[in-house]
């Protein structure tokens, strides 16, 4: 059928398919959702807008809502009046199959929403009329658009009255859906022109059982009782204006999860401006910073920000709105750390208030739980932004759950690269094998163990071959022991074992790597301390081998003894995945100037310290395992070199974006990290797109047919992967790249800075710095017009007291050279506004 989670990202609505009842209930059952629902039922419109939104009537294969008119197998039905809903609910719950009921919920305003199976060949409106006639109830005639969203409530029994697992079945013939969509779009357009009398959009409600209906041969309503129901432009404008006014009035008294925005802003100035509100000299910069942070808890709503942010020290409304507009135009990130710290401080105050009263009251406890839930939800920022992943990757994510989506993608991409060992992709004009090294970092009991069976599913076929080779080696060892004192010894077999343990010596590992017949080897360890202990005295050797494996360069190992291992590998192909604690990560990566750190993709498991113990809802099922096995079987059949121009352009755009961001903040560490993250992400994207190619072939020809197609036409995959460079798929590039960059700076920034500034490093001297993001950049902290002294002051505020005047001069020269600023006649500086 159909169920999509709808969100607004970068100003555009995006849709993510919900494929399981567990995930659906989890989204509805969060503490944040419950807190917002409680406020919405108390009349808070802004809280209602923060409720989770679902769409049931549309189909979004690319994850983009705008312009999509593909129908799903279901449709939504809105009943606003509580009494009418109660009456209809009794009938629906009594005979759900009769009506094709898929979901029934009580709405935020105590009316209700229902989802039904759609009769094919009929528009949403025609299906809604059919149900309204059967139930003899009123219906909302403005709710027939395919892209209509429903603000949902909770998963509690009193809110979610009925839910069928059929709602989550994904059975679509894309060609048939597209063909039907074109027909229904025409009929929908026709139906919008002519609605039954009494169904006027301005009246909203329509009682179909009171009308006499006539249909033509195609089932479209026609007859004298139908009238044109268009609303005039002026009437629509008046309605929109009144709605906006009501929303604005509500927003002025709004709060976040029960905490008044005024209280949040007051705490903000206490923590970041010594308790002082902005003054004329700094109100522009400080208002911008405040808006950049508050937008994350205001739904990125311009009107709401305008209402809750005061005009400080006689700030003209127009200038304040200019700051807010600039803040809303900034890149959307996870909730900034400073805002999280403000909310954490308020959380502590609420806990203390509860403790001082003997016991925390129900509202305080609910608030604390809601704030904890909001932080947990923010950890899903990258997961929520992901487009729909292809078969195999999608199953891997479903097997571990949303919280571990990014870590599992980080873990399986090296396995995909190992399986597609013959594939090379052009990166900045040079062909690259899919060489990847990753580390999954997380505290003990943080869920890293659930990644093991997923990786095992991807490598199962290779391991079966390795097991056969290892049996042959065991037989050779037995023969060698039996012939210990004989003149003729059995010849040692050189077998291409590809899955290699890291609990090994340098010599044995080098010999194994030399015998893979030019294919990728793969190593996985669920405990990175295996590496730290086994290679403790030879960690530099391990680092060198992995660096050469990432680059695919030659690897040589010479020894004088004839019995010693001598290795000459033209291209070292070895993908590695390690899981372990952050502490073990620092034992594996203990040099921050040799380039090893920048070659590793680091993922981070979410903090589950205070998460309540629940049943594990996410396990690798046999169906998921089979899907992964099918994709893994097809990947080795793809071989050759491919150029992906759109992916290349996406990488270059990201590099330039980060370059400009880091220049504004004079952030050399972040600027240098981008160089390796870009090609790494391009390799990961190639791995994901190869899975998309395999999925498309399976959908079109079946599993065996897909295998046959790849064998008969070895160039087929190259043609298909070029077509997978869709805008939606390429959006995943920024998500993966930003995620890598965030984690690299989280784990290594301070260590990299200390290493480069140490006396033992023969490079330029740098200075102590704290971890900061884009929202704290020096450039953004400065007013539109500023002096050298103000630039020096803000540089010291961001970087620390070691900043010299010469460093600031060089920074300003860089800004001027890049066209970010100009010099005024009075020797002050002015930001250059980009052309619109």
Image (cartoon, rainbow, N blue to C red):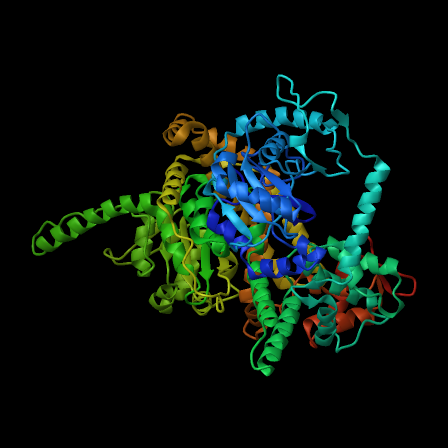
Work out whether residue 590 or residue 152 is closer to the camera in this orientation and state it. Answer: 152
38 relative to 174, above or below: below
Give percent across and percent down for residue 270. 72, 76
Quadrant assignment, res 348? bottom right
Give percent across and percent down for residue 496. 29, 45
* Residue 108 appearing in the image: yes
Residue at point 82%, 66% (across, down): 310
Work out whether residue 571 or residue 589 is closer to the camera in this orientation and state it. Answer: 589
As drawn, is 113 to the left or to the right of 282? left
Work out whether residue 419 or residue 427 is closer to the camera in this orientation and state it. Answer: 419
63 relative to 267, above or below: above
Give percent across and percent down for residue 621. 37, 47
Give percent across and percent down for residue 9. 65, 49
Residue at point 82%, 48% (across, down): 242
Work out whether residue 415 or residue 823 is closer to the camera in this orientation and state it. Answer: 415
As drawn, is 648 to the left or to the right of 789? left
Quadrant assignment, res 65? top right
469 relative to 785, above or below: above
In the image as oriented, which residue stretches furthest toward the right?
825
As drawn, is 434 to the left or to the right of 129? left
114 relative to 710, above or below: below
């Amino acid at each position: 059928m159909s169920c999509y989670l709808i969100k607004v990202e970068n100003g555009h609505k995006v849709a993510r398919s919900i494929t399981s009842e567990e995930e659906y209930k989890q989204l509805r059952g969060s503490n944040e959702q419950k807190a917002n629902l409680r406020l919405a039922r108390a009349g808070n419109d802004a809280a209602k807008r923060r409720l989770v939104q679902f769409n049931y009537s549309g189909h979004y294969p690319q994850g983009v809502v705008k312009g999509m008119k593909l129908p799903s197998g279901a449709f939504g039905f809105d009943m606003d009046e509580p009494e009418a809903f109660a009456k209809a609910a009794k009938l629906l719950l009594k005979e759900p199959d009769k009506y094709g009921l898929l979901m029934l919920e009580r709405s935020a305003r105590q009316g209700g929403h229902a989802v039904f199976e759609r009769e094919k060949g009929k528009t949403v409106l025609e299906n809604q009329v059919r149900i309204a006639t059967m139930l003899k109830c009123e219906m909302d005639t403005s709710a027939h658009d395919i892209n209509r969203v429903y603000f949902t409530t909770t998963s509690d029994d009193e809110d979610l009255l009925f839910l069928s697992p059929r709602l989550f079945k994904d059975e679509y013939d894309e060609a048939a859906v597209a063909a039907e969509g074109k027909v229904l779009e025409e009929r929908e357009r026709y139906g919008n022109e002519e609605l039954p009398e009494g169904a006027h959009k301005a009246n909203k409600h329509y009682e179909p059982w009171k009308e006499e209906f006539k249909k033509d041969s195609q089932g479209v309503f026609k007859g004298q009782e139908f009238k044109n129901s268009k609303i005039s432009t002026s009437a629509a404008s008046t309605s929109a204006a009144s709605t906006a006014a009501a929303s604005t009035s509500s927003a002025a008294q709004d709060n976040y999860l029960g905490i008044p925005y005024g209280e949040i802003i007051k705490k903000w100035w206490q923590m970041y401006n010594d308790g002082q509100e902005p003054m004329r000299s700094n109100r522009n910069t400080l208002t911008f910073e405040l808006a950049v942070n508050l937008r994350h808890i205001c739904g990125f709503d311009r009107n709401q920000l305008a209402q809750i942010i005061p005009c400080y020290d006689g700030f003209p409304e127009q200038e304040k709105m200019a700051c807010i507009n600039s803040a809303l135009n900034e890149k959307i990130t996870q909730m900034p750390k400073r805002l999280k710290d403000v909310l954490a401080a308020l959380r502590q105050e609420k806990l203390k208030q509860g403790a001082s009263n003997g016991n925390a009251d129900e509202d305080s406890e609910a608030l604390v739980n809601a704030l904890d839930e909001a932080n947990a939800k923010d950890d899903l920022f990258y997961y929520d932004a992901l487009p729909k992943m292809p078969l195999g990757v999608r199953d891997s994510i479903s097997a571990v759950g949303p919280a571990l989506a990014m870590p599992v993608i980080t873990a399986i991409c090296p396995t995909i690269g190992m399986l597609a060992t013959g594939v090379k992709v052009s990166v900045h004009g040079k062909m690259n094998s899919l060489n990847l090294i990753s580390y999954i970092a997380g505290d003990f009991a943080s869920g890293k163990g659930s990644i093991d069976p997923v990786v095992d599913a991807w490598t199962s076929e290779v391991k079966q071959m390795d097991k056969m080779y290892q049996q042959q080696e065991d037989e050779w060892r037995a023969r060698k022991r039996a012939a210990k004192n004989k003149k003729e010894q059995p010849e040692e077999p050189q077998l291409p074992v590809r899955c290699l343990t890291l609990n090994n010596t340098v010599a044995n590992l080098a010999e194994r790597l030399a015998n893979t017949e030019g294919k990728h080897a793969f190593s996985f360890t669920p405990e990175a301390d295996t590496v730290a202990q086994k290679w403790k005295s030879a960690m530099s050797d391990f680092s060198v081998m992995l660096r050469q494996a990432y680059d695919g360069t030659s690897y040589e190992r010479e020894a004088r003894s004839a019995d010693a291992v001598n290795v000459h590998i033209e291209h070292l192909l070895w993908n590695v995945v390690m899981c372990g604690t952050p502490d073990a990560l620092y034992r594996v990566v203990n040099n921050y100037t040799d380039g090893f750190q920048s070659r590793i993709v680091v993922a981070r498991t979410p903090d589950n310290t205070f998460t309540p113990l629940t049943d594990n809802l996410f396990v690798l099922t046999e169906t998921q395992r089979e899907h992964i096995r099918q994709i893994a079987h097809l990947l080795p059949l793809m071989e050759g070199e491919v150029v992906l121009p759109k992916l290349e352009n996406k990488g270059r755009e990201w590099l330039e974006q980060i370059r400009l961001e880091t220049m504004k903040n004079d952030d050399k560490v972040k600027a240098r990290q981008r160089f390796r993250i870009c090609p790494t992400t391009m390799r990961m994207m190639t791995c994901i797109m190869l899975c998309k190619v395999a999925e498309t072939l399976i959908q079109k020809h079946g599993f065996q047919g897909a295998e046959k197609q790849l064998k008969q036409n070895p160039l087929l995959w190259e043609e298909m992967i070029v077509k997978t460079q869709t805008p939606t798929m390429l959006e995943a590039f920024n998500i993966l790249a930003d995620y890598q960059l965030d984690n690299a700076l989280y784990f290594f920034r301070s260590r990299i800075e200390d290493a480069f500034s140490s006396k033992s490093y023969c490079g330029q001297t740098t200075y102590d710095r704290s971890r900061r993001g884009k929202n704290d950049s020096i450039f953004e902290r400065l007013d539109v017009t500023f002096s050298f002294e103000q630039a020096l002051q803000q540089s010291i505020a961001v970087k620390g007291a070691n900043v010299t005047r010469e460093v600031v001069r060089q920074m300003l020269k860089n800004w001027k050279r890049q066209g970010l600023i100009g010099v005024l006649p009075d020797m002050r500086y002015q930001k250059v506004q980009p052309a619109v």
